[in-house]
Image (cartoon, helix red, strand yellow):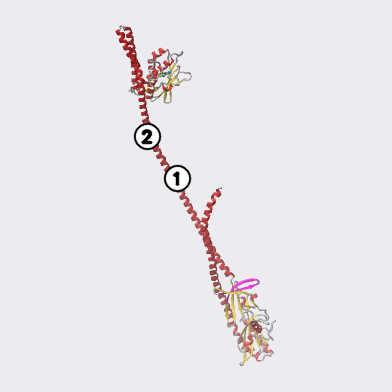
Amino acid sequence: MGGRRHAPRTDVTQRFLARPVAWAALLLVLAAAVIAYFGSTFATKTYFDQAASRGQTTLRLAVAVLRGQMSRYQSLPALIADHYDIQALLADPDNPARRTKADAYLKEINVLLASSDIYVIKPGGETIAASNYDGPVSFVGENFSYRPYYQDAIQGRQGRFFALGTTSLKRGYYFSSPVTIRDEIKGVVVFKVDIDAIEASWKGDDYEILVSDPEGIIFMTDQLDWLYSSLKPLTADRLARTEASRRYANATLRELPITQTSISGGHQLMTITMGGQAREYLVLAEPMPEAGWTVSVLLDTAPVHAQAMTSVTAALLLLGLAVLAAAILLQRRARLRERLELQRSAQAELEERVALRTADLALVNQQLGTEVAERRATEQQLRQTQSDLIQAGKLAALGQMSAALSHELNQPLTAVKTYADNAAILIERNRTEEARDNVSRISSLADRMASISRHLRNFARKPNEQLGPVALADVVKDTLEIVAWRLKAAQTEVAVDLGSRPLIVQAGQIRLQQVLVNLISNAADAVEGQAVRLITLTARRQDDKVTIAVADNGPGIPDAIAPRIFDPFFTTKGVGKGLGLGLSISYNIIKDFGGNLAVMNQLEGGALFTITLDAASPSRREAAE
Ligand code: ADP
């Protein structure tokens, strides 16, 4: 599935990439084609020119050698013709003594001049003396009247001719000269030069030197196959002419198998196919008019083509290398660019992330700042609300209290009025005793009202007492003294347990005492009527708090009234017995101390009031309280 998802992306990339690559490849192919075409043309031309100039040198050298050989021998027949022995022989051709002498002379100078043969022909063509008279093939007696060199010389001209010896079957160049005795041509001297030695010096690696006669027949070449082959078509005329001079004796003449001739870049090219193998040659030719020859140099073009091919291949390879180098360079650059891009993007991402984090942090910081401000505002508001609530609670309590107070005071006041009215009537009627009783009731009612007012004063009065460390043991001792009469009346005692270590609490001594008096009085009220009356006062320190517990085995507090017992004027006690202010005042006092007053019923029955106060370290101010 992942592959599929990626496929279109790869496609797009490929298509995107494919274009420039395709273009580059096309350009490259074009460049290669251009190099191959023009390069090969240019290289071929250059190498052909070089080969041609090399061939020209070879040709010039070959021609010079040939000319040298010829000029070396051409005047010799005339010189020999003037010799006494030759003259003497031709003056009397049939004289055997003269023949012997002439033979000896010819043999001697033939060795001296390193020529092939020297011989003398009398008019009519018969050879009458020869340097090879005693050799295996002797010319003596042979008739050479058909040879052009004889025909030229007998007519008084210097003759020269190239031919394959009909008797010796050796190729040679013939120089001839007439032998003139008293202005009369009496015979011919022929001087034959061997050309094998010249030919042997022509061995070349990539060229062939060939010499052709006026009919175009090759008679000198180191390529044996080509010997007596014709460069020109063997027409009947040509064959007849050659036949007449018996130039090539009985050698078979044939045409050189030239399959193609062309001119390329000013060079003459010729393809010769022999044995099914075609070879192309660059042809350079120079005529030697003095001999009627044409000297040609044939350069094999295969090495030239190979050279050109090598150059083109090298150029193409260079191009390939250049392209490869360029590709590598481009790739490297691309990779570098990619890497840089990657680094840049990574850095950018990092920076972005840092910026984001910083922004986040700034935002969080700002949020925190706002939150703190909000908290502060909320706290402020809470405090305000709290104080408002306290105020409202106070007002509510005041209202409640006013209502309760008017009720509490109205009753005794009504009673006082009734008792007072009755007392007045009883005094008028002299019923003093009853009147006194009424007055005493009034007095007790006044006492009750005074008690209410005293309690209220306590309730309303803002204590001027300072808070401080208070020794709990002292407070408990004073309290027990105050409530002693009440306990006695209830026929009970308080079991006190303050632990082993003296406990010091943060409180006001008088007010804490007031609270304890209240709690113990209530407990005494509660246990009244119980068969066994138990009141316990226990105090313990736990960490930095001190818990004071006042428990009794009374009836406990019914769940229905438990939430209201700390309300002012809430009481279950009968009229004249309880004001319902004790717990309310106690609660407020403990709150003023920064502590807490709570109530719960014990499992075994009876109420358990718990005061929790801050523990304090003892101080001298304790004494002042
Ligand atoms: P008073 O004692 O004048 O009634 P308080 O405020 O001291 O007023 O008490 C309120 C009410 O709480 C009492 O009327 C009583 O019903 C209940 N009460 C207080 N202490 C105890 C106790 N130890 N056991 C049972 N009920 C109690």
Q: Is residue 308 left or right of residue 370?
A: right
Closer-to-camera residue (367/133): 367
Which residue corresponds to mark 2? 377
Task: Check the image and report above or below for 140 versus 20.
Answer: below
Q: Earlier in the sequence, mark 2 or mark 1?
A: 1
What amino acid type is highlighted by mark number 2?
A: Ala
Q: Position of residue 293 (x, y in %)?
A: 60, 81
Which residue corresponds to mark 1? 353
Res. 198 image quadrant: bottom right
Q: Counting other residues with Cα less than 10 Å from the Cα at mark 2, is it few (<14), some (14-19), or many (20 or more)? A: few
In terms of secondary structure, what is the magenta stretch mainly?
A: strand
Q: Position of residue 201 (x, y in %)?
A: 61, 75
Q: Position of residue 399 (x, y in %)?
A: 35, 23
The quadrant of the rendered image in which ligand 1 is seen is top left
What amino acid type is highlighted by mark number 1?
A: Arg
Closer-to-camera residue (394/15): 394
Q: Residue at x 57, y 80 (%)?
A: 287
Q: Residue at x 52, y 54 (%)?
A: 13
Q: Is residue 182 left or right of residue 384?
A: right
Quarter of the rendering occupied by the C terminus: top left
Mark 2 lies on a secondary structure that is helix
Residue 356 visible at all: yes
- Foreground: disc 2 or disc 1: 2
Residue furthest right in the image: 136
Residue furthest bottom in the image: 182
Magenta residues span 267-284
Q: Position of residue 84 (x, y in %)?
A: 63, 89
